[in-house]
Image (cartoon, rainbow, N blue to C red):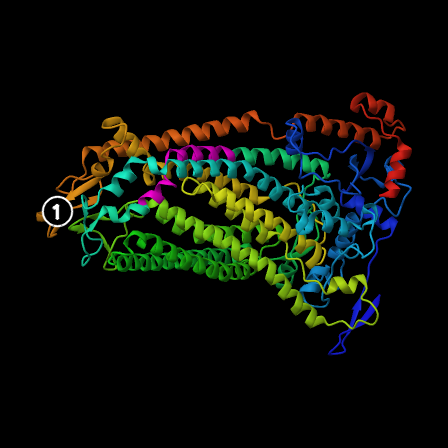
Amino acid sequence: MEEAMLESTKILTTFVKLHAPWELCCVCAEDLSMRSPLQAHPNPTKNWSETVLQTLHIPVLMSQEVPNQPLDYYTCQFKASKLQRFLGSDDHENFFTPVQRHQIVSHILSNAIYGKRKKAEIGIERLLDEEVFKAAFPLHDGPYELPDSKVHPEDMNPRQVLFHYWARWGAWYKYQPLDHIREYFGEKIGIYFAWIGLYTAWLIPASFVGILVFLYGVFTMNSDIPATEVCLSEDKYVMCPLSDIGEYWSLSDVCFFVKVAYLFDHPGTVFYAVFVSFWAVTFLEFWKRKSVSLAHHWDCLDFHEEEERPRPEYAAKACDLRENPITGTKEPFFDPREQLPRILTGMGVIIIMITLVLIFIIAVIMYRVVINMVLFENKDLRPRSAIISSTSAAVVNLLIIMAIGRVYETLALKLTQWEMHRTQTEFENQLTFKVFIFQFVNFYSSIFYIAFFKGRFVGYPGHYNRFFGLRSEECNNGGCLIELAQQLGVIMIGKQIINNAQEIIVPKLKGLWHRWQVRLVKVVKLTRWEEDYELIENEGLFQEYLEIVLQFGFITIFVAAFPLAPLFALLNNWVEIRLDAQKFVCETRRPVAERAQNIGVWFQILDALAQIAVISNAFLIAFTSEFLPKILYQYHYDWSLHGYINFTLAYANVNTSGLQQTCRYRDFRDENGDYNIFYWHLLAVRLGFVILFEHVVFGISKLIDIMVPDIPKALELKIKREQYLAKQALADTDRFLTSEEDEEINGAPVQTEDINLRMSEA
C-alpha cells in the first residue's frame, strides 16, 4: 500500500497493489480453464506475404527481428493435480504469464463480496461504479521510452519492445509483432490488430487494381466519342432550362464535366465492381482461416464465455432477486415484461433519429438544387456549377453526419443502460446494433439517394415532378456517377481526416485534463502505479471497430463509382494502426486482458456488408452507369458510339411543354413525352444484368466458401496432435510422450531441459 498527496487540495490518495500468490494462481487457473504448456514446438514467425515475396526473390522490407519472441507450445487445460506434467512448473514466479495473473486478480476482484449478496454488492466494477474506488487497472511493465544509454534489444521491457518495434511512426511499414501484442494486452486486443493488419494488407491489391482502372480512364478519356461529340457540338444542342425562370443553354457548356465523368464511368468500372465483390468475399474467407489459426496459436480456440455475472448497474437497479438456473444462486432480477417496453422505446428513438437524418438529407438536397440553379444562370460558372454545388453540399452533409452521429452515440449508450440488459455481452451487442444501424443510415443514406433515386422521378418539360415547390433533382449531363464519386470521396475522406485528428488531439486533451485533476505531488519520482494513474482510462475497441467497418462499407458497396476508395482506405489504415498502437502503449492505462476467439458480432456485420455490396454494385452498373445504354446502342446502331449523345437527348414539344422553342433534355422519350421502345429494351437489359451479376457473384462466392475450409489442413493435424498430447498428459498413467517420439511426427526434437531453461529466461 502506498499513499500520495494531491497537490492543490491535499487529499490523501491511497494506492493498493495486489499480487496473486502461487497457490491462489493454481486454484484460479483451473477454475478459469486456463491452458498451460506441455511441449514446445517451432513457432514460425513468417506470414504468407513474406513467404510469397521470398519465393519471388523480392526484398521483404516489412520484415523485422523483434526480440524476446514468445515461445509456442502444445498446451492443454491446467490441472493442479497434474502440475508436474507441465513445462516450467517448478518455476513458480514465471509459470503464469503477467497477463494470466492479471486475469486471475481481475476474476477474484469481480467476484469478491463486499456487502450483502442479496443486494448484489459484489465485485470491483460496482465499487468503481459507486465511486468507492477511483480506478482499478493492471500496471504497465515499466516506461515505454528508451533510456538515453544504448540498450540491448533483449534487455528492453515488453512495453519498450512494443513501442520501438510497433507503436512509433518509424515502424509504419513493418509487420506487426502480433505475438508480443497478445502477450502484453491479451487475445481480444491482439485479434483486433491482427484483423485490421490483414485487412490493410488486402487493401494493397485492391488499391493497385483501382489505380489501374482509374489510369485507364485517364488515358482513354480523350478517345471517348460521346464526350468528344459534346465538346464539339457548340450550339448544336439547345437544352431546356433547368428552372422555370432559367435560360436555354448549350450542351457544350458542360464539356469539362462530361470529360471528368468518364473517369468514373467507363468499362473498367464494371470489371472493378466484379473484382471487389470477389475480393470482399475472399477476404472474409481468408480471415476466418486466419482467426482460427490465431485462436489455436493463442490457446483460445475452445474458449467459451463462462456464466457471466450481472452488470454492476443492472445489479444496483434491479428490484428483485431470483435463483440463477445455471449456478443455483440468487442474483438480481429485472422482469422481462418491464424490460420489453424499454426496448421498444429504444427502437422508437432509433426510428425518430433516422427520420431526423432523412430530414437533414432533404434539406441538403434543397440546398444543392437552389445553389445549382443560381450558379447555372452564370454562363462563366455553368461548366462547374454541378461540381461546386454537389461538393459544397457534400461538405455540409459531412458536418451534419459527424455532429448528429456523436449526439446519437451518447443517446444510444444512455438508452442501452436504461434498457437493463443483464450481462455485459448482451449490453455490448445491443449497443453495437443500435449504433451501427443508425450510423449505416447516417453515413450511407445520402450516397444511396444519389446512386439510386436522384434523377429517377424528374418528369419531362411541361410535366415536371415538384417537391416543396422545387423541381425534382436531376442528374447532370455527365451522369449521376460523377456526383456519387464526389459525395463518396468527400464523406469518406473527410470522415477519415476528422477521426484521425480526433484520435491525435482528444487523448492528449483528456490526458492534460486528467493530470490537472489528479496533480500528484512529485517528491522524488513517481512510482509505476502513480504514473499509470495519470494516464487516461482505456475506452476499449468499440469505436475502432465501428470506424473500420463503416470504411469497409464505403469501399465495397459503392466502389463502382470511386475506384480510388481502397487507396484512401489503405493510407488511412496505415495511420490508424499507428495511432491505435500509440494510444494503447503510451497514452492509456493497461486494460485487463480479455480472451476472445474472433472479432465477434462485427464479422456478421462485415459479411452482411459484403452481400449488400454485390447487390449495390449490380444496380449501380445497371441503372446509374452509362455502361449498359452504350452497349445496347452499339449493338443496335453504331459500334463506334457516333451519334450516341444525340440519341440520348429527347425533343421537348413546344405545344405540350409550354416552352417558347423546341429544346432537348436527357431521356429516352418521344415528342409526346412517352417512353420509346429503346427505353423498354434497356430496362429489360438492366434487370437481366442485375439478375445475372448477382447470381454469378453469389454462386462463385458460395463455391469459394465450400471449397475453402475454415480450418487449414495443417492446423487440423496440429489440433489433433495437441489433443493427443493433452490426453497423454492428463491420463492417470505416468507415460508421457518423449521428445524422441515427437521427432518422428514433427521432425524437430525439443529437449525438456532446454525448454525449462528458456521458460526461466522468458
- Quadrant of residue 143 in the image? bottom right
Q: Residue at x 57, y 49 (%)?
A: 545
Q: Secondary structure at mark 1?
A: loop
Q: Is residue 391 above or below residue 173?
A: below
Question: What x and y, as percent, mark residue 470?
Answer: 24, 58
**For residue 269: magenta?**
yes
The extreme bottom residue here reads 9
Q: Nearer the viewer, residue 294 or 345?
A: 294
Q: Which residues are magenta?
A: 258-279
Question: What x and y, as percent, mark residue 272?
Answer: 44, 35
Q: Nearer the viewer, residue 655 or 235?
A: 235
Residue 337 appears in the picture as rendered: no
Question: What x and y, as percent, mark residue 18?
Answer: 82, 58
Left or right relative to 436: residue 30: right
- Quadrant of residue 725 in the image? top right
**What residue is shown with label 1?**
662
Q: Residue at x 50, y 28 (%)?
A: 702
Q: Is residue 409 above or below residue 67?
A: below
Q: Residue at x 60, y 47 (%)?
A: 574
